[in-house]
Image: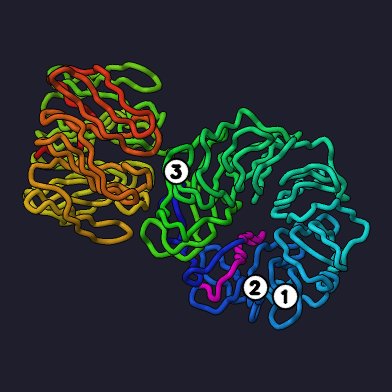
Amino acid sequence: MRLNSDGTIDNSFNASLTTFGFVSSIVQQPDGKILVGGNFANANGTARINLVRFNLDGTLDATFNPGTGNDNSTITVAVQPDGRILVGGTFTIFNGAPRQSIVRLNTDGSLDISFNPTELSVGTIANTSDIIVLPGGKILIGGRYMPGNSFQRLLRLNSNGTIDATFTPGETGNGSVTDLIRQPDGKILVSGTFATYNGQPRVAIARVSADGILDAAFNPGTGANGFIQKMALQTDGKVLIVGAFTTFNSTSRNRVARLNTDGSVDASFNIGTGADNLVQAVTLQADGKIIIGGSFLNYNGVPRVHLARLNTNGSLDTSVVSGFTNDQRFFVYELLTQADGKILVGGLFNAYNGIPRNSFLRLTANSAPTRTRFDFDGDRLADLSVFRPSNGIWYLLNSQSGFTATQFGISEDRLAPADYDGDGRTDIAVFRPSNGFWYILRSTAGFTATQFGAAEDIPQPADFDGDGRAELAVFRPSNGIWYIFNLVNNNFTATQFGISTDKPVVGDYDGDGRSDIAVYRISNGIWYVQRSTAGFTGTQFGAAEDRPVTGDYDGDGRTDLAVFRPSNGIWYLLNSTAGFTAMQFGIGTDEPTPADYDGDGRTDIAVYRASNGIWYVQRSTQGFTGTQFGAAEDRPISNAFVPLP
């Protein structure tokens, strides 16, 4: 499957492996085809043992057939300039032929018999964790080897597979090499579980010359207190490292760190409390943002199950959420940024956002800005805002740009704020029942007016097609029909879903980046949801008096079922990942105003109290706050889509 940049699914990519199969290596060839290695028995229903090649759209490439494959896991794959493929791992046999931990294949997957590293078969131990094809055709391999009963962790092979005796790497003790990166200047970064290199202290990371000699200019001090699994080299020469460590050179760095070119910790890269469990994969995007994967459940205290995107300074990019569920059997092990910016993800998992997928998927680099509801200044924090019917003025207390007041609308108008032009900022907008017009003041594209709807209609603008821009949408109680109009392509749809007493509760319930048609039926407390990818569902949650307060309260990218009960002031949440919670917050006359006020990717419980004009907000990361902003007659903007009882 393919996912949008905010962690949602694009079903045009659907490559599947064995249930509970494991992906440890992903490589994209220059022609766009994708090599995947790991431990599995089939791909897209066809026998492929531990190695497969997919076409760019996720279909199986039948022209690549490795036969019976290898007898144990594939850990790493590399492609030579001539198209031949190097495969490393823990195997001893490939397609019936003896091959100890490394093999070279022809472009069709058949064994290349001209490459036969017999010297690696002399010892009793051999596993290859990474491979680099060097200029001139020689091959650098890292892992754990015992050629001639002499332990080695780093070897250079000639193009025919024999060991290159001119390469003299240092000893790395009892450790092993996990990752290799060749810098543009030819020097090699080496990471792993070792504590020394050629007798010099180098804990878990070192840099060596092209000939294997330790580079003293790269000095990581006491290094990492746990192994380094993967590295990524930035264009400025700084090095990202991830793994099992919690400190680096005695500086707290929970499993993610960035090093300067001399090996010292980059203090400007601030991860906060970092990841709460092992990080096993890292990749860079073209804009400098960083995607990490592993076994973790939280990053800097914010839920991010197995997958997270970081800003260039190490902080969490709250616009991207993970669709993995909290299941300790599963993890992300490999990440790769394709040439077109899409992200390939491998590991061990069986679903994403509730949709069955086995161990391999793709994220799409979507250029549409990320959106936070009721964020008028585009800083990803919801803003305190009210509409005053007596003068038609929108008063905004923007979290970034401060106070503004804009006259737009009349007292009869129904509020319809949304991001209509896809610039990442909520636009001021109203629906006028008397003439069925939508009046929209787009923050980038300017003013527009469109006639769409009738006097009884309930406006429900949302992004139903996943293009980053809200469509005009109304729910008509008299016939239970949803009418949706796309402002970009003028596409119109009408869908019967609901009855006259239902309350519309639009949200992205399956996390695919598209808003779903949904209603809450007060007569039985059932939520009926037509999910755009995962299909229909009905769930009983709530009572007749309850007010639906939809939002993503656990930060997993999916809208949660939630209600506010005026009789006791309790918020009842059925989180899609975190499960059931209940919290007393507010009184019966309060207007619920759920939104993400602290920008952590989670909807916050909040109310507006008309009697004193105070906003009471329980932020999920930054805690409680109370702010006076508004008058008794004002309509809080973030209450615009909370149905009345």
Q: Are marks 1 and 2 in contact (CB under 8 Å)?
A: yes
The label on residue 72 is 2
Q: Mark 1 highlights which residue?
A: 92
Q: Quadrant of the C terminus?
A: top left
Side of 162 where 109 appears, left or right: left
Of the residues under marks 1 and 3, which one precedes in the sequence? 1
The residues bearing labels 1 and 2 have C-alpha atoms spaced at a distance of: 7 Å
Of the residues under marks 2 and 3, which one precedes in the sequence? 2
Q: Quadrant of the N terminus?
A: bottom left
The label on residue 306 is none
The residues bearing labels 2 and 3 have C-alpha atoms spaced at a distance of: 35 Å
Q: Is residue 549 magenta?
A: no
The amino acid sitting under disc 1 is Thr
Side of 604 where 586 appears, left or right: left
The label on residue 320 is 3
Residue at point 14%, 54% (across, down): 526
In the image, the segment drawn in magenta is 25-43
Element assignment for label 2 = loop
